[in-house]
Image: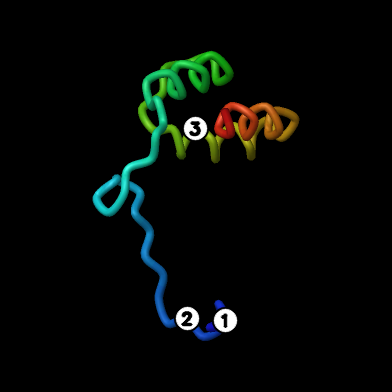
Amino acid sequence: MPSLRDARAFIFDLDGTLLSLPVEWPQLRKKFAELAQREITSVFQTLAWLASEKPEMRAALFRILDE
């Protein structure tokens, strides 16, 4: 079995071109906007911002993502 150390490249499919995740993006944006107390345009930028600016919210953010 190959190891991650043997990998020469990784493919990230952040826009859903290769596969589709069953995520209700509008609902996720709404919940993140409530936590951020502002309108958001990017779920992942908001996640990074909240996790760095308000580390006490990190568990709540990832719980929302898991839902």
Does 9 appear above or below 56? Answer: below
Q: Seen from this angle, which residue lies furthest left?
A: 17
Q: Identify residue type, mark 1.
A: Ser
Q: Are marks 1 and 2 in contact (CB under 8 Å)?
A: yes
User: In terms of secondary structure, where does tag 3 sit?
Assistant: helix
User: In terms of secondary structure, where does tag 1 sit?
Assistant: loop
Picture coordinates of residue 56, whole percent (x, y) = 75, 30
Does 26 appear above or below 19? Answer: above
Picture coordinates of residue 25, whole percent (x, y) = 38, 27
- Tell me if mark 1 has few (under 14), some (14-19) or many (20+) residues whose alpha carbon lies within 10 angstroms of its own: few
Q: Is residue 7 left or right of residue 42?
A: right
Q: Identify residue type, mark 2.
A: Ala
Q: Which residue is mark 3?
A: 46
Name which residue lies at 55% across and 32% down: 65
Picture coordinates of residue 20, whole percent (x, y) = 32, 43
Q: In which quadrant of the rendered image does the N terminus lie?
A: bottom right
Name which residue lies at 67% across and 27% down: 60
- Tell me if mark 2 has few (under 14), some (14-19) or many (20+) residues whose alpha carbon lies within 10 angstroms of its own: few
Q: In which quadrant of the rendered image does the C terminus lie?
A: top right
Q: Is residue 51 left or right of residue 44?
A: right
Residue 7 badge: 2
Residue 3 badge: 1
- Tell me if mark 3 has few (under 14), some (14-19) or many (20+) residues whose alpha carbon lies within 10 angstroms of its own: many
Distance of label 1 from label 3 (alpha carbons): 32 Å
Residue 29 badge: none
Name which residue lies at 51% across and 18% down: 31
